[in-house]
Amino acid sequence: MPISEISNREVVYALRENSTLEAAKLMRQHHVGDLVVVDDKAGVKVPVGIVTDRDLVVEIMGPELDPNAISVGDIMTPELAVVKEDAGLYESIQYMRAVGVRRLPVVSSDGGLVGILTLDDMLELLAEEMSMLAKLVRHEHEKEAINRH
């Protein structure tokens, strides 16, 4: 299954020049804990970093800095791990584990942002799959019991 089938296509993003206050307001408005930071390259939103609610607390609120004076680009995680939209689920899980991230922006072949894959999304999907497997086992046991009588 390509990762594009389970990734969230409604990605909340910010530009590098947005203030951290604007970022916090976006997170609150959209009920998300992170923003993908993008550069707009000829209409293509290319992911360049991520800012999390934890970044805002540790980097801005904790040291009591002015959130209007510091941009998202100043505090974003710059080494961004991304995954191509045609990557498989298992491959994406391995990659997330290898690079130690909970969120992966999903990009098209031209590098444009098309979605985001989160650990929470994958855990939900895998839990559903495990539930279906458990139901299959139970069904097989019931079927066998019926056929023996």
Image (tube, rainbow, N blue to C red):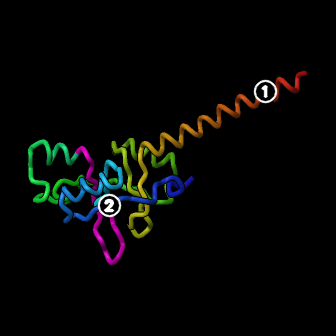
Up-down relation of residue 122 to residue 45 (above or below): above
Q: Is residue 53 magenta?
A: yes
Assign the magenta stretch its main secondary structure.
strand
> Separation of disc 1 and disc 2 at Cα?
49 Å
Circle 2 crowding by C-alpha within 10 Å: few under 14, some 14–19, many from 20: many
Q: Which image quadrant for residue 50?
A: bottom left
Identify the residue at horizontal 44%, vertical 65% (top origin).
108
Label 2 amino acid?
A: Tyr
- State which tag comes first along the sequence, 1 or 2: 2
The residue beneath circle 2 is 13
SS label for mark 1: helix
Up-down relation of residue 9 to residue 139 (above or below): below
Comparing 27 with 124, the one in front is: 27
SS label for mark 2: strand
Comparing 78 with 116, the one in front is: 116
Please indicate whether residue 10 sits to the left or right of residue 130 in the image: left
Q: Which mark is residue 75?
A: none
Q: Is residue 105 magenta?
A: no
